[in-house]
Image (tube, rainbow, N blue to C red):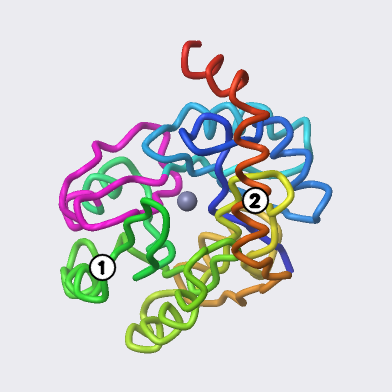
Amino acid sequence: MGLADLHIHSIYSYDGTAPVAAVLNRAWEVGLNVIAITDHDEIKGSLKAFDLAPHFGVEVIPGIEITTAEGDLLALFVTEKIEPNLSLIETILKVGEAGGICIAPHPMARGMGMKSLSRASIRNATKHSDASRILLAIETYNATALDRDSNTHAQALAAEHPNLTQVGNSDAHILQTIGLGATEFRGYTAANLLDALWIGATEVHRGTQLGSARILGSWALNYVLSAPARAAVVDG
Ligand SMILES: [Zn+2]
């Protein structure tokens, strides 16, 4: 079985702290086969990871976390930025045009400036004949969600939508939390993973769930320490 973490932030995210090469190295160390760097409305870090991946023994799926008008949305297998602040269905259709697929991350979760898709938004998308073929999965385990009830809510929502494949992710904003949430699938490659997402053949892998105070504390420290590096990639 392969292990994937499809929701990781790098220093190219306004709130990320980890350089791309360090993310790849950490992913290899913790035994991940496939990862996606999904920075907020930014694709540069993800494309850099894709280029560097062969040196690290990890396969990278290019991706992005898009700010839609209705909440955050993960897009995988895309190599371009998708316009933010569009409706959920418009965004999903644009991802489809770009050749990608979507995952609803941390549905209904609240927290520090975080906007998550509501139950109604997800239901609408699953009823839309075209969008429902692109929105394949729902994140039922987010290892670093500050809203401690959000994973329970996400599982209940997934039960209402059996056609959405369940995935686990870290949503890591620091190196230490990469892989704490992951998705198991048959095979080891990104192509195998995509097959599993299509047919709902995944297993959600729940690692240690750290307390929200610890997550926030570690992030704050790393955020301060990584400020010069973050400024450099924004300028560059
Ligand atoms: Zn995220």
Q: Amino acid at mark 2?
A: Gly
Q: Is residue 130 left or right of residue 25?
A: left
Q: Which residues are magenta?
A: 65-91
Per the image, the residue denoted by label 1 is 132
Check the image and report above or below for 198 versus 157.
above
Q: Amino acid at mark 1?
A: Ser
Per the image, the residue denoted by label 2 is 217
**Could you tell me residue 204's position as x and y percent?**
61, 75
Q: At 67% from the left edge and 58% from the top edge, which residue is drawn? A: 214
- Total marks drawn? 2
**Could you tell me residue 140's position as x and y percent?**
49, 74
Q: Secondary structure at mark 2?
A: helix
Q: Nearer the viewer, residue 196 or 39?
A: 39
Label 2 CB-ligand 1 distance < 8 A: no
Looking at the image, is mark 1 or mark 2 nearer the viewer?
A: 2
Check the image and report above or below for 88 versus 183.
above
Q: Is residue 120 left or right of residue 135?
A: left
Q: At 33% from the left edge and 61% from the top edge, which residue is drawn? A: 116
